[in-house]
Image: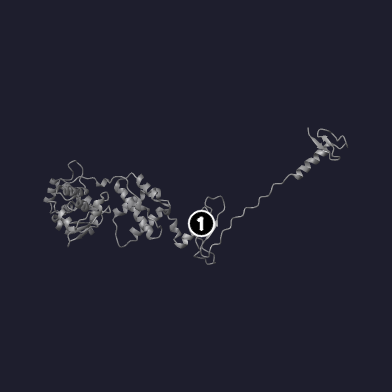
Amino acid sequence: MALIKCIECSHVVSDKAVACPNCGCPVSFTMNAATSEAEITKPQPKKRKPRKRKKYKKLPNGFGCIRQLSGNRSRPFAAYPPVKAFNLNGSPVSQPAIGYYESWYQAFDALRSFNANPYDIAHENMTFEELFELYFKTKYIDNKKRQYSKASIRSTKAAFKNCKPLHHKKFKDIRKYDLQNIIDNCTLKHASLELIVTLFKQMYKFARENDITDKDYSEFVKINIPDDDESGEPFTQEELDILWKNKDNEIVQFILIMIYSGFRIKAFETIEINQEEKYFKGGVKTRAGKNRIVPIHNAILKYAFNFYPDIFNANVFRAKQFYPILQELDIATTISGKKHTPHDCRHTFSWLCDKYKVDELSKHLLMGHSLREDVEKSVYGHRTIDELRTEINKIKV
């Protein structure tokens, strides 16, 4: 029960009564009037004013524009480059956005960087696969100065195939971590990993030359497994004697060149031969090994002067000449029963250096070994070409 005021006489009366005892006014009239009054005086909800977009400063003419896109986006601000071309009716030719950003100020910074160093936006969004196709076409198809071997082309394609996780990734978004992941997760041998790293380096060089990127993350990529190509077993003295007995054979002559110089077989494709000062210059793989000078051992001088790197192919020699001649001479396998490889010639050179007491520093310099772990030798270890010539000719035939 509740007490209410009569609408006629303001006398207090129970809401359960039929009429006001003072004036006889029906209580129902009073109740209806109170309800109507409450509805009238009930506060109405305020209408929400439409939210105004924040105004940003006007951009200079020819600077480009920034648009805030509709919808619930994590990066709603699109930065567009300045218009450079127009249709016949005078309307501007639309260009793709430079990028999409969380704030107007980030988009402004992107436009400012673009205007400071304009680039091809198509290149900006180029994927790893698209860049590879452009690089491959430029190197192997459009290049008329040099003819690459089928093996080189196959190696490049195989290296690209082993980079599948990167194929559809935007090249400018790739970082050192992405490249290193490819190497670390690849189950192939060291030689195949070397091909992938080489591809990375060549693609980044190509990208920098064409203003597609200004950074080179390939220089930080490392192969974190042992180099299985470095394993091998030297020829024995008896096997060397057999080779010398067959020195009139041109294939044997080149095998002797490899044994008494210490170079890897691949180095002979680009090696320089200085006949006047009687030395080799070349090398592959390591920084210490590349472009090193090795005096030509007296015993192989005439063989070296008859060698022509321009027509030499390491893969052809290995398959069609090296293995067959060793088979013919019955020295194809090592004492332990393994197959002799061209890299065994380098191991033989190392063994001969030790056998004939070539000093340690000269041996490292002749073989192109890195001396970074030995600070004293790497900084103060020097040998003249005449000193190296004296050391290498300690090796007896």
Q: Residue at x 79, y 40 (%)?
A: 34
- Above or below, 86 relative to 262: below
In this view, which residue lies farthest toward the left? 245
Left or right: 239 with respect to 206? left
- Above or below, 120 relative to 349: below
Q: Nearer the viewer, residue 87 or 294?
A: 294
Q: Residue at x 40, y 53 (%)?
A: 128
Q: Quadrant of residue 306?
A: bottom left
Give the structural element (helix, strand or loop) at label 1: helix
Picture coordinates of residue 255, whole percent (x, y): 18, 52
Left or right: 82 with respect to 379? right
Number of numbered labels in the structure image: 1
Instruction: Give the quadrant of the N terminus.
Output: top right
Q: Nearer the viewer, residue 319 or 239?
A: 239
Picture coordinates of residue 215, whole percent (x, y): 39, 56
Residue type at the position of mark 1: Ala
Label 1 neighbour load within 10 Å: few <14, some 14-19, many 20+:
many
Q: Quadrant of residue 202?
A: bottom left
Left or right: 289 with respect to 182? left
Q: Nearer the viewer, residue 89 or 35?
A: 35
Q: Residue at x 53, y 56 (%)?
A: 104
> Which color mode does the image show?
one colour
Query: In this rendering, does residue 306 appear at all?
Result: no
Picture coordinates of residue 200, whole percent (x, y): 35, 53
Q: Which residue is mark 1?
A: 107
Q: Residue at x 53, y 54 (%)?
A: 103
